[in-house]
Amino acid sequence: MLAAEPAAGGAFRWAAAARALPLSRLDVPGGDRHAASLAAVSSRTIRPMYTDSLEFLEEEREAFRPYEALAGLTDEQLSIGFVGPDRWSGRDLMAHLVAWQSYALDVARELAVNQSSPTKERLDREWDARGDDINREIQDTWGNLPMDELRRRFATLPGELRGYLTVVPETRWLKNADYLRYFLDETIDHYADHAPDLEAILAGPPA
């Protein structure tokens, strides 16, 4: 697991040997609304489809593991802004990730009892209509949560999402191109997109 450790001058650096974030599969139709750039998407490796949900969940768990280092930063460190791809603080990044995980959890809950998800359909329409305004709203709402509550959600939401995906019939998401693309967008691919933000945050402010 990655951990943020103090470095000279109070900055933070990557601890131990940081493994690369797993690259996700691109052989699923649909666009990635979180992709930072075409170059970021094209750099991912094309691999076979998942054989079962456990394979997906293991990859997702490993992809999110480096982000757990954010929980080891103090509230003050999480509030420091950085000049990075998104110019975010650690708090901003935590809020952004768990907000989209929360939406994915709502979709998984609906798929556990239905063939389709009204939440996903609504989010798709809203993204088509408003795009990045949604991300700005997330920063205004989730980013302003009390730090203790944000930390709680950051610690619990990923596990809740994984738990629900174990009970959703695979035919409704893993073997469904549209829904698999959706869950990739909100998890594995999303984490890969924000790896530069994470590295900048854990590295700390310039000396």
Image: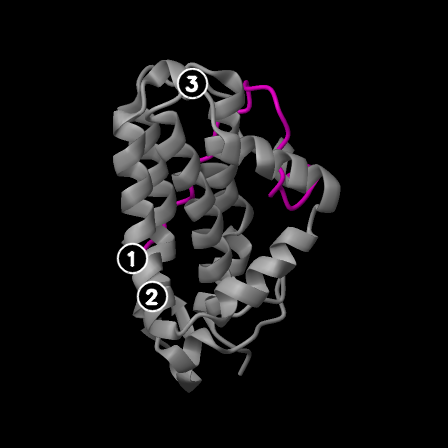
User: Percent x, y for residue 15?
Assistant: 32, 63
- x and y percent of residue 72 in the render? 30, 69
Distance between the alpha carbons at the discs numbered 3 and 1:
29 Å
Whether pointer 1 and pointer 2 mark residues with C-beta atoms closer than 8 Å, the reply is: yes
Q: Secondary structure at mark 2?
A: helix
- Tag 2 residue: 151
Secondary element type, mark 1: helix
**Which residue does the image show at 41% across and 40% down from the upper left?**
106
* Mark 3 / mark 1, whichever is N-terminal: 3
Q: Name the mark on residue 155.
A: 1
* Residue at the right extreme, as displayed: 129
Residues under numbered marks 2 and 3 in contact, where contact means CB atoms less than 8 Å apart:
no
**Which amino acid, mark 1?**
Ala
Q: CA distance from mark 1 to mark 2?
A: 6 Å
At label 2, which amino acid type do we have?
Answer: Arg
Instruction: Determine the residue positioned at 38% across, 13% down.
Output: 171
Q: Residues within 10 Å of mark 3 (few under 14, many from 20)?
A: few
Amino acid type at mark 3: Gln
Closer to the camera, 19 or 152?
A: 152
Magenta highlight range: 15-39
Numbered disc in front, either 2 or 3? 3
Residue 26: image location, x then y, percent: 55, 24
Residue at 44% from the left image edge and 70% from the top image edge? 145
Is residue 6 found inside the magenta-colored segment of the image? no
